[in-house]
Amino acid sequence: MSVDQIDFIVNDCLLAAGQGIGTEKSVDFAAIAWWRDRYRRFFLHAITVLGNSYEADRARVTAVGRYLGQRALFHAASSPSIDLRAAELASHDVETGCRMNAVREGLSPGMPAATA
Amino acid sequence: MNTDMTRSDVRPTAPGFDTTIDGGPDQTLALERVVDAIVDDCCFAVGQGVGLRATLDFDAITYLCEHFRPKFLMAMRHFGNRWLEDRQTVTAVAMMLGERAVRYANGAATIGLDDVRRAAADVERYCQLHSARRTRGRGDANTEGATARIAGYWCTWDPKP
């Protein structure tokens, strides 16, 4: 999958994050915009610099997207909606897990989007 | 497709943000960016509607984006950026689209392109009927522009291209 499909890839992952949240809570627009900015950069780096293949990695990446949504739901606790803070905490959880996974698989740390 | 845009500069910052786009290269680019952010928001909401009941094929997601993005763009060009006003309604419709897609997948683990196409047709039909009813209720019968305005992002047709 080429770089010109990067926006579709981000859409795919945001949709997966929405799946993890479900209809229980709404999500602030700022949180979605923040996720989009952040992961678009990561994915672009993974594909262009590290040479990752989204076709090969899609199942794993979208699974992580769903997990991201579930973590955001957790961090939102009793709030009626998922705000930017909950989104940031969820990203921290997920990226920490991805870095640990990368180290376990013998890849260099500091490349969360490439391995998740 | 532009691959190096950032979305942080297009985030609406004020409730009820409403800007009429009057053309020109800068405005067009700004509009494209806003529409990208709206497509993201709607994809997210579709996912919420689907939940963990099924996954979606990549071509189904590509179809959604390619199908609705021009409609969103058209709506923005005609009515300005009303996203913060309309967001709750539009994302609710996106969730409905996800729900319909799950139904069309009929218990399959994966939602395919045909399922999403049928779901999209359902929500567009729903929006058109709803908008026509509201237009009549407001006494604007036979005003295509008024109907399109109410139909908003999901099924806007262009009265005067």
Image: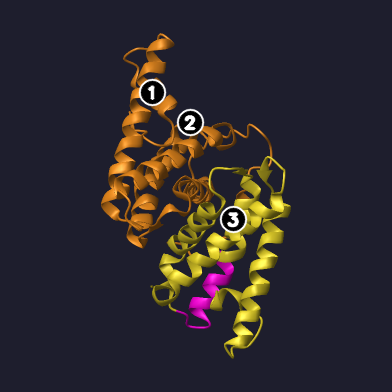
Q: Chain of mark 2?
A: B
Q: Residue at x 61, y 49 (%)?
A: B10
Q: Residue furthest top?
A: B139
* Residue placed most toward the observer, A88 or A46: A88
First of labels 3, 2 by sequence position = 3
Q: Chain of mark 3?
A: B
Marks 1/2: CA–CA distance? 18 Å
Query: Which image quarter: residue A28?
Result: top right
Residue placed under numbered mark 3 in the picture: B7
Q: Secondary structure beneath disc 2?
A: helix
Q: Which chain is yellow?
A: A
Q: Residue at x 72, y 43 (%)?
A: A78
Q: Secondary structure beneath disc 3?
A: loop
Placement of A93 over or under A17, stated as above or below = below
Residue placed under numbered mark 1 in the picture: B130
- Amino acid type at mark 3: Arg
